[in-house]
């Protein structure tokens, strides 16, 4: 029996065979040096060397039109952002990336090579090789990325460990990604510095590992905005907070800094901020910025004495 054809999915006069597409994609994403004893693309499953310490696993999904505006940005950016967002989840746990597998659905005629070039770029800069994946025809361009990492010499950092008296810090100013999206909508070129911050987010892997080494009590990445993610950390830890500062990135608005999302800076809670800064500086990293303090009362959640509203990006499902 011949496979049925969905009339809602655009067809192509000369669709390419799956094996041919996979061969081209393997050439694009298979640029990483494969460690001895490992097997990446080419078999039914990848083979990795034993993990050191705890294994950490996360999955992220990016959909064209939801996570990226196809009229404003090239398809490459969707692939890059999908891998970067998944690796950022490892960074938020203090983990070192080991590998990624990607699953793509797309209508016939989608430039899959362009999409995977973006993934390959992110794979290279994050040192997270793409070791396998899957392709399927579908109505929408969707990229699902599963990443695996490891935490040598200690456990992963959770968001549930913040304690009263801890200092709250972030790895950098906030709002750059949201400001970049706004600027692109207003006509700024793709090479604009803030637009690039939206197109090509940079997971804070080195910072996450440094924070874990410094013994921070809690940590998470700011993917949905400080105004939402800080409340999530407080909820998980059963604490409150008092903010005294909110570092707004140059060119961004206060609203973009609090609820814009997709900055992928790290939020950390520690009782030894001096040690944290020392380790960051010793590793050549920018010193983290203090934004407030953790308090015992979960109902106390303020910024400069006023209630800090829970707001940020959430999908409507």
Image (tube, rainbow, N blue to C red):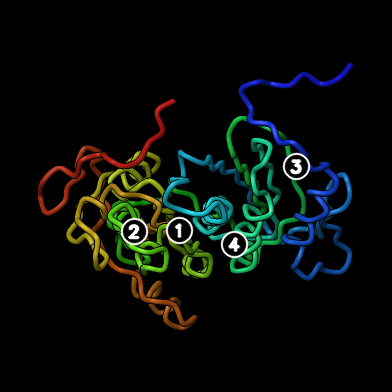
Sequence order check, earlier mark of 3 and 1: 3
Q: Which residue does the numbered mark 3 point to in the structure image?
A: 134
Q: Quadrant of residue 180?
A: bottom left
Q: Determine the residue positioned at 67% across, 41% down.
A: 109
Q: Which residue does the numbered mark 4 point to in the structure image?
A: 122
Do tag 2 and tag 1 residues touch (Cβ < 8 Å)? yes
Q: Residues within 10 Å of mark 1 (few under 14, many from 20)?
A: many
In this view of the protein, which residue sits in the foreground, 71 or 145?
Answer: 71
**Residue 199, label in figure:** 1
* Mark-to-mark CA distance, 3 and 2: 32 Å
Q: Which residue does the numbered mark 2 point to in the structure image?
A: 180
**In the shown orientation, is residue 33 left or right of residue 229?**
right
Q: Is residue 152 visible?
A: no
Residue 36: image location, x then y, percent = 87, 69
Q: Residues within 10 Å of mark 2 (few under 14, many from 20)?
A: many
Q: Residues within 10 Å of mark 3 (few under 14, many from 20)?
A: few
Residue 291: image location, x then y, percent = 25, 61
Q: Secondary structure at mark 3?
A: strand
Q: Secondary structure at mark 1?
A: helix
**In the shown orientation, is residue 60 left or right of residue 264?**
right
* Mark-to-mark CA distance, 3 and 1: 24 Å
Q: Secondary structure at mark 4?
A: helix
* Mark-to-mark CA distance, 4 and 1: 11 Å
**In the shown orientation, is residue 228 left or right of residue 133?**
left
Q: Determine the residue positioned at 74% across, 36% down.
A: 13
Q: Residues within 10 Å of mark 4 (few under 14, many from 20)?
A: many
**Residue 168, label in figure:** none
Do tag 4 and tag 1 residues touch (Cβ < 8 Å)? no
Q: Secondary structure at mark 2?
A: helix
């Amino acid at each position: 029996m011949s496979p049925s054809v969905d009339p809602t999915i655009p067809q192509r006069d000369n669709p390419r065979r799956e094996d041919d597409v996979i061969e081209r994609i393997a050439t694009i994403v298979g640029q990483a040096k494969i460690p001895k004893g490992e097997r990446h693309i080419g078999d039914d499953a990848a083979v990795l060397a034993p993990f050191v310490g705890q294994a950490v696993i996360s999955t992220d999904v990016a959909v064209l039109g939801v996570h990226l505006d196809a009229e404003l940005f090239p398809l490459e950016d969707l692939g890059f952002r999908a891998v970067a967002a998944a690796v950022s989840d490892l960074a938020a746990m203090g983990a070192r990336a080991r590998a990624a597998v990607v699953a793509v659905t797309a209508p016939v005629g989608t430039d899959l090579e362009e999409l995977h070039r973006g993934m390959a770029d992110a794979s290279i800069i994050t040192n997270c090789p793409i070791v396998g994946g899957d392709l399927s025809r579908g109505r929408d361009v969707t990229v699902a990325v599963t990443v695996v990492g490891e935490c040598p010499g200690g456990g992963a950092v959770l968001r549930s460990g913040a304690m009263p008296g801890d200092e709250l810090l972030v790895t950098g100013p906030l709002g750059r990604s949201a400001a970049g999206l706004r600027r692109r909508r207003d006509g700024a070129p793709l090479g604009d510095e803030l637009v690039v911050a939206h197109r090509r987010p940079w997971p804070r892997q080195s910072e996450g590992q440094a924070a874990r080494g410094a013994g921070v009590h809690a940590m998470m990445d700011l993917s949905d905005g400080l105004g939402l993610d800080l409340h999530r950390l407080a909820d998980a830890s059963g604490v409150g907070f008092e903010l005294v500062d909110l570092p707004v990135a140059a060119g961004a608005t206060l609203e973009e800094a609090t609820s814009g999302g997709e900055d992928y800076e790290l939020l950390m809670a520690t009782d030894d901020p001096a040690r944290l800064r020392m380790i960051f500086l010793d590793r050549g990293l920018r010193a983290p910025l203090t934004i407030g303090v953790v308090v015992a009362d979960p109902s106390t959640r303020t910024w400069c004495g006023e209630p800090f509203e829970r707001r940020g990006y959430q999908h409507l499902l």
